[in-house]
Amino acid sequence: MTSLVYYGSPRQARLVAAETLPAKLDLILDRLHLRERVKDEVVALKVHTGCNISYSVIHPVFIRKVVQAIKDGGGKPFLVDLDWVVNGAESRGYTPEVIGCPIYPAAGPNERHFYAHERQFKNLDTWKVCGMIEEASFLVNFAHAKGHPSCSYGGAFKNLALGCMVGETRSKMHDVSHFDRYWFAERCPDAEARQKIIAACPHGAIIQDKYKPDELHLHMENCNQCGRCLEVAPKGSLKIDPVNWDSFQQAMAISTQISLSTFAPGKATHLVLATHMTPVCDCFGFTSMPILPDAGIFGSDDIVALDQAVLDVTAKTPLIEENVPMSMEVHTRKGHPLQWLHGPYKDPYKVVEYGAQLGLGSQEYELLDVLPVENLRPAPMGYISAQGN
Ligand code: SF4
């Protein structure tokens, strides 16, 4: 099955508002028939509202357009995000007055409002979906594309996978990376050898257990799989293995499936804004320089096709290496540029592969540019209207 992904390129031929990304968002919402689909629906608009002083999150101009489209269609929108980021969202420009609808913490102010779903996966058996998500009748998943230290890419899947679950579940989802053993203490009884392993890592990714000195822990987020630790580790004592990162991606796909299962068929749609893509997630509380060129705006009812398309488009551009923070290193230039940044085992395509296996959509898609720049005639700059349209 081939799914449709609507796309607005960041390119424009003329200096007019109609050729810019917010205007292209309107065209995408038209193609998704959002207005016609939301009459009398209670619509949860899931957005990552950032944290602290991050400013690369989705600008309120885009959010307001989605909110207005939902209202025009007779729906009742509210913006929803996790309690600890919603508190303070006004400092990043998200207020009900600006975006045009209420803003709620997804599981209530103390994360006590949730619905438990049973599903066994490694260390997880209960997944707690935020109440405001599960009680909505329609979902608009609006994600900002960026890098991510656990999986290299945060997009449409990530926005739901972590953003629709309470903190207890999010924490267990991160712990799945430690479920498959990677440290075999019995093969390294020598304390000096353990210190050598720790010292070999330039990223502080291996640490000693506070209470059991012969146990070493891997910080999956910090590790870029450079392999320096393996060169000094006694044979068989340490594994740097894709399974530990893949399991997090699998958990994200399962989490997304559980959240989406609370909506009737056809009652969810997905958008990704791929601009100012930073090395790490919006929850870090700051905005770094972009590490990929702006790729545009994407929309689809198929979350698998959508993230696949964003990854394919961004894969065609090189990493902006001069913008990579000095604490990170590029030790490989194989695979997607986000793997150059976060390491080869953090394969951003894994989550879409797992999502497709779970029946959430298709990796085959057709990318439909809603305003192809080839169809536009360049014009001299001329007079720039203050109204701009
Ligand atoms: S692979 Fe590299 S980054 Fe990862 S723990 Fe080993 S030395 Fe550190």
Image (spheres, rainbow, N blue to C red):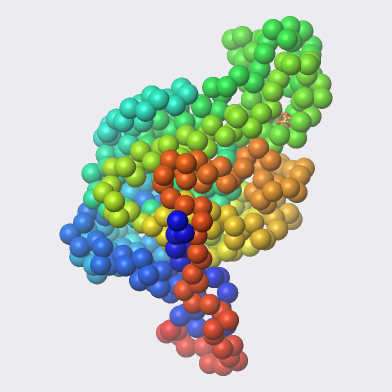
Q: Is residue 166 visible?
A: yes
Judging depth in this view, the residue of 118 and 381 nearest the camera is: 118
> Can residue 281 be seen from the camera position used here?
no
- The residue closer to the viewer here, 258 or 192, is 258
Residue 357 placed where, x, y %?
47, 41
Residue 175 placement (x, y as % from top left): 51, 26
Picture mark count? 0
**What residue do we see at 47% from left, 24% from top?**
122
Q: Is residue 383 left or right of residue 271?
A: right
Where ligand 1 lies, by image quadrant? top right
Q: Percent from the top left, x then y, of residue 114?
A: 28, 34
Q: Is residue 351 above or below residue 389?
A: above
Please state which of residues 264 and 124 is positioned toward the viewer in this rendering. Answer: 264
Q: Quadrant of residue 317?
A: bottom right
Q: Quadrant of residue 205?
A: top right
Residue at 76% across / 31% down in the picture? 227
Residue at x 44% of width, y 26% of height: 121
Residue 121 is left or right of residue 292, and the answer is: left
